[in-house]
Amino acid sequence: MTTTGTPAVTTRLLHEISRGYLKTALLRTAMELRLFDGVGEHGAEAGALADERSVDPRALRIVLDALVSIGLLRKEAGRYTLPPGGREYLLSSGAQYFGGAVRLGASDWEWEAQRRLTDAVRKGGTVLTEHYLTPELDYWEDFAEHTTWFNNGAAEVLADQLVPWARGRASVDVLDVAASHGAYGFTFARREPRARIWCLDWPNVLPHTRRNAERLGLADRLYLLPGDMFEVPLGGPYDILLVTNVLHHFAQDTAVRLLTRLSDAVKPGGRIAVVGHTYREGDDPARNPMPFLFSVSMLAQTHDGETHSVEAYERMLSASGFTGTRMYTGPKAQHTVFLAEKA
């Protein structure tokens, strides 16, 4: 450890980083073979589980022991069991099952983007033929289908702030831009019975959004706007505008152009809610690594996107016609919620 508290560079640290993909591969394989479901709440032995999953017994033993080594299983007297938290996150029946996240985060498509990171650094942005901004990319279908977990508590934080405000409104019409799974708008609508939600996204994504609304009993308050958020007619005007986990795909000037266009569809005195990873200018990346690592993903898969600072969000909202920006977070929220008023 150095005097600043940052770990010293050692060969062990470098080995752990350079071979970090092994842990990702183990988790992906375990999810694909449903090994955690096979272990279940009562445990399993390697031989029996190999027969059940129709895999090679020796190979499975190697994988199970490796899962023990990284803390995703326990082993005692040759029997494998789930560690604390495993039931919730690792079983497909768990309340916070992480399989959908792994399906995306450890996908071949994501791995290929990071494999080309050196090229992206040379160019200054993605070198992929298909990337986050490719129209109607099928990746976003998987995202909408498998990542309702993605709000990480931020949807509840957003609803906590908007529901009391909405009680005084004559109407509660909401435009959810790049709605995807719809979790932000739907969480609000379940707590505000007058809310009507217009979801804007690519035509191939919106059927997944609709299914999520049907599952929650909100289909009768759902309206779909298929198309490009920079071009599609927006309708309105709306009381609330949701722009969640969108602006990091763009440079600040492009984000301002989008927000300015969207602001024209918001009623005077209406609200905008923006959600995303963030940090404060001057933050030490070693103390708050997530937003800085997330920027790497944007570098590899967008033309000029990155994680924006708190101050940048405030500047972007002000430049596009919103005032009184306030920031909210919560103990479970890995994303920050910004609320502002249409001037």
Image: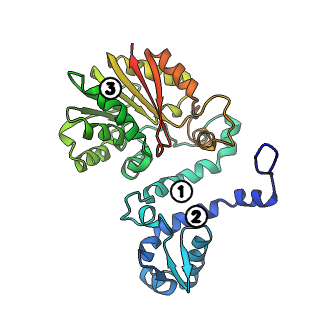
At which x and y percent is residue 246?
46, 34
Q: Local crowd at mark 2 within 10 Å, few (<14), some, or many (≥20)? A: some
N-term mark: 3 or 1: 1
Secondary structure beneath dot 3 equals: strand
Q: Which disc number belongs to residue 25?
A: 2
The part of the image, by quadrant, that contains residue 220 is top left
Real-space CA distance between mark 3 and mark 2, rounded to the nearest whole angstrom: 41 Å
> Which kind of residue does numbered mark 3 sit on?
Ile
Q: Give me the residue at 33% from left, 39% from top.
A: 203
The part of the image, by quadrant, that contains residue 135 is top left
Secondary structure beneath dot 1 equals: loop
Real-space CA distance between mark 3 and mark 1, rounded to the nearest whole angstrom: 34 Å
Instruction: State left or right for residue 109 relative to residue 138.
Output: right
How many labels sit on residues? 3
Residue highlighted by disc 3: 240
Closer to us: 164 or 316: 164
Instruction: State left or right for residue 166 relative to residue 14.
Output: left
Residue highlighted by disc 1: 106
Q: Give me the residue at 55% from left, 82% from top.
A: 76
Is 2 drawn above or below residue 304 in the view shown?
A: below
Instruction: Verify CB contact (< 8 Å) between mark 3 and mark 2.
Output: no
Instruction: Verify CB contact (< 8 Å) between mark 1 and mark 2.
Output: yes
